[in-house]
Image (cartoon, rainbow, N blue to C red):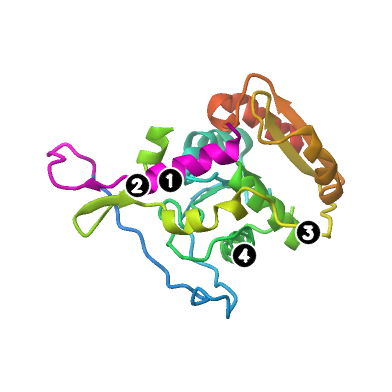
C-alpha cells in the first residue's frame, strides 16, 4: 500500500475514534488543553493566514554556532526528538530547538494548514528566539517544511498517536486538529511547485528501507537544491531518528563539519 494511502487510512480511523473521559480510573494520565486560533482567512481565502505562536523547547548551547532546529512529521510532536535533541546538544555544544507544528502537539489549532503557512510560522518564531541563521532538520512533513523554508528565505504507530490525546470539556479528544489535517492531507503529501533554487548546502537523509523518496525524485531535488547531498542510512525505515539515532546524529554532524 503506498505511504500516502496508509497515512490517509490512519487519519480516517483516528478521526472516527472518540474515547470518553469517564471510567479511565485513578491512574489515568492527565492531559493539557490546547489553544484554538480562529481562521485568519474566514475559510474562504480572503486574507493571508497569520503565523501562530508555536510551542517549542530550546536547549542552551554556544551562541556563536548556528542552532539546530528539529521539525517533526505528520501526527508527530516535538517530544519525538527529545533524546536526539539532548544528545545532539551534548555532543555538539549547539543550541537545539524542537518545535510543535501548528495543529500538532501543544501548538495552537487553526483551520489554515499548508507548507507555506508552516514555513511562515517558523519565519516568525526563529528571529524572535535569535536563532537566525540556523540548521533545520525535518522529518517527513517537517522535512518538506524545512525545504520550503530554505527556498523562501535562503537560510541555512498507535502509541505514537495516543500521545496526542487531550482533555476538552470532560472528554479525551485528539490534540491533533484532525479536521484540518484531513482537509489538507493532499497538500501535505506533496511538495509545492517552486521555480527558485536554494544555493546553500543541504542534506537529504533517507532510510534504506523507506519508499518515501524515490530515485525519480532526485532530479527535482537537485534542481531546487543544487548543492544537495543525498545520503542513505542502511537498515532504517522512514523514522531514521527513532530506528538509528546514532547514525542519524553522525550523519548530521558530518554535514555540519
Q: Which residue corresponds to the image point at 43% horizontal and 46% vertical from the top-left?
A: 12
Of marks 1 and 3, which one's residue comes earlier in the chain?
1
Q: Badge 2 is on which residue?
A: 16
Foreground label between 1 and 3: 1
Q: Badge 1 is on which residue?
A: 12
Where does the image place residue 227, in percent across and percent down from the top left? 86, 44
Q: Is residue 23 magenta-colored?
A: yes
Of marks 4 and 1, which one's residue comes earlier in the chain?
1
Q: Badge 3 is on which residue?
A: 194
Mark 2 and mark 1: span between their CA atoms?
6 Å
Q: Secondary structure at mark 3?
A: loop
Foreground label between 4 and 1: 1
The reply, left or right, for residue 143 in relation to residue 255 is left
Q: Secondary structure at mark 1?
A: helix
Foreground label between 4 and 3: 3
The number of discs equals 4
Viewer-nearest residue: 174 or 251? 174
Of marks 2 and 4, which one's residue comes earlier in the chain?
2
Contact check, label 2 and label 4, Cβ < 8 Å: no
Q: Which residues are magenta?
A: 1-29
Amino acid at each position: 500500500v503506498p505511504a500516502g494511502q496508509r497515512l490517509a487510512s490512519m487519519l480516517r480511523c483516528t478521526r472516527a475514534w472518540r474515547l470518553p473521559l469517564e471510567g479511565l480510573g485513578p491512574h489515568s494520565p492527565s492531559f493539557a488543553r490546547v489553544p484554538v486560533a480562529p481562521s485568519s482567512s474566514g475559510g474562504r481565502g480572503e486574507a493571508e493566514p497569520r503565523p501562530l505562536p508555536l510551542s517549542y523547547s530550546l536547549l542552551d548551547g554556544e551562541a556563536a554556532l548556528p542552532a539546530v532546529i528539529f521539525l517533526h512529521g505528520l501526527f508527530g510532536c516535538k517530544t519525538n526528538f527529545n533524546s536526539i535533541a539532548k544528545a545532539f546538544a551534548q555532543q555538539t555544544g549547539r543550541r537545539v530547538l524542537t518545535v510543535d507544528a501548528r495543529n500538532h502537539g501543544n501548538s495552537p489549532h487553526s483551520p489554515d494548514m499548508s507548507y507555506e503557512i508552516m514555513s511562515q510560522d517558523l519565519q516568525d518564531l526563529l528571529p524572535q528566539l535569535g536563532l537566525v541563521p540556523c540548521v533545520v532538520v525535518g522529518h517527513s512533513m517537517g522535512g518538506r517544511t524545512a525545504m520550503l523554508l530554505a527556498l523562501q528565505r535562503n537560510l541555512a504507530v498507535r502509541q505514537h498517536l495516543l500521545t496526542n490525546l487531550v482533555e476538552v470539556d470532560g472528554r479525551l479528544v485528539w490534540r491533533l486538529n484532525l479536521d484540518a489535517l484531513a482537509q489538507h492531507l493532499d497538500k501535505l503529501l506533496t511538495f509545492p511547485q517552486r521555480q527558485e533554487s536554494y544555493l546553500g548546502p543541504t542534506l537529504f537523509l533517507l532510510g534504506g528501507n523507506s519508499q518515501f523518496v524515490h530515485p525519480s525524485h532526485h532530479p527535482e531535488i537537485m534542481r531546487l537544491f543544487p548543492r544537495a547531498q543525498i545520503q542513505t542510512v542502511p537498515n532504517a525505515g522512514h523514522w531514521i531518528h527513532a530506528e538509528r539515532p546514532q547514525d542519524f546524529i553522525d550523519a548530521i554532524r558530518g554535514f555540519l563539519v
